[in-house]
Image (spheres, helix red, strand yellow):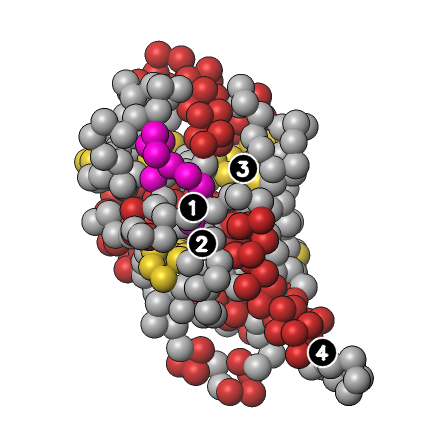
Amino acid sequence: MTGLGAITPIGNTAPETWAALLNGVSGAGPITQFDASKFKTQFACEVKGFDASKHFDRKEARKYDRYAQLALVSATEAIEDAALDLEKEDLNRIGVIFAAGIGGIRSFEDEVRDYNEERGPRFNPFFIPKIIADIAAGHISIKYGFRGPNFATVSACASSTNAIADAFNYIRLGKANVIVAGGAEAAVAIVGVGGFNAMNALSTRNDSPQTASRPFSGSRDGFVLGEGAAGLVLEEMEHAVARGAKIYAEVVGSGLSADAYHLTASHPEGLGAILVMQNALEDAGLTPDAIDYINVHGTSTPIGDISEVRAIKQVFGDHAYELNISSTKSMTGHLLGAAGAVEALASVLAVKNDIVPPTINHAEGDDDPEIDYKLNFTFNKAQKRTVRAALSNTFGFGGHNASVIVKKFEK
């Protein structure tokens, strides 16, 4: 990892996001992007203070859905952070794998609502390019002239972890020197909130939005919808060392699995979660005791949090009690297809800086009898410790599971 970029509900850059994570800042608040007064859930974790005109000219901005705008902003920051000299790089060997779980849902909603049957169809000529989930990857490659592997991964909330895993594997296979990986999502929209409300998936804690995302607490009642993006530059090690790149951490393993159980619910015993973590450890050539921190999926849903805890105890055994565990979704909300990229970024910076961001919003005594609180969930306050290696979990509707492992870089 040689470059990081982010735009999230708690920061408009990677450094801002990291500082807010360490300080336990909640990104939740009343929805401002539409009138949510009639919805069961009236709050979300929105990106704040984002002005597209500061990044794109007016004509250009009209071509992009909000999710693609956020993707471009985060990828640009990551590429600039990596300090690649593109005049010296072989652009045929630089790729983009950028994920979205849904894609341009806001543009889809706008066009359909604007359709008038009597007037006849008058669709925006950019409608299709704005809504498809792969278009952010295309825009990034066009902006920089990157001609290497270029596509999107779509696996619901595991999407951008899949993107990182694919980037890792394409570089290992010798298909590219550098890949810009990540994910973006902007689903704080009428159909996004309405759809998740219909599934009873979202918290309805309208009287206290900032405390609504409370993973592993007994009173949790669903996830908080978020939006944003993160970009990460993955680079072949010798290529990075040769150009004197700043190296945040080394990606050493990834794992994939399926629950094969239910459309939306995780397996109650965490079978898919167990397998994906075991696969990541095997791929990395690491034993469980090499991991110091797990950035968990931890969405604050009644079933999901329990099954993930069971899986961690199964995989890590006694070492589970030596781990730091935290859910940064307690601060960012759930960014759907962008979640894995934001959480991988947090994991990389935990390894780099030897500090673990907290799981906020847990109150004394607000416990779930199904959760083992002897585990260190890093409640409410960041904790300094040596982080040799970190594992990041993401699980998606459809039973998709993806994990990546990063560790301190050693020449």
Where residue 38 sits: x, y (%)?
Answer: 48, 62
Q: Main secondary structure of the magenta part?
A: loop
Spatial CA span between label 2 and label 3: 23 Å
Mark 2 against mark 4, which lies toward the viewer? 2
Where residue 144 sits: x, y (%)?
Answer: 55, 71
- Pointer 1 residue: 203
- Residue located 53% across and 80% down the image: 61
Task: Classify mark 3: helix, strand or loop.
Answer: strand
- Residue located 34% across and 34% down the image: 219
Instruction: State which tag comes first along the sequence, 4 or 3.
Output: 4
Residue extent of the magenta highlight: 214-224
Instruction: State which tag comes first along the sequence, 2 or 4.
Output: 2
Is 360 located above or below residue 239 in the figure?
Answer: above
Where residue 269 sits: x, y (%)?
Answer: 53, 19
Instruction: State which tag comes first along the sequence, 1 or 2.
Output: 2
Spatial CA span between label 1 and label 3: 18 Å
Judge left or right: residue 127 versus residue 265. right
Mark 1 against mark 3, which lies toward the viewer? 1
The reply to whether discs 1 and 2 touch (Cβ–Cβ < 8 Å) is yes
Q: Can residue 8 be seen in this view?
A: no
Q: Can residue 208 be seen in this view?
A: yes
Where residue 58 sits: x, y (%)?
Answer: 51, 87
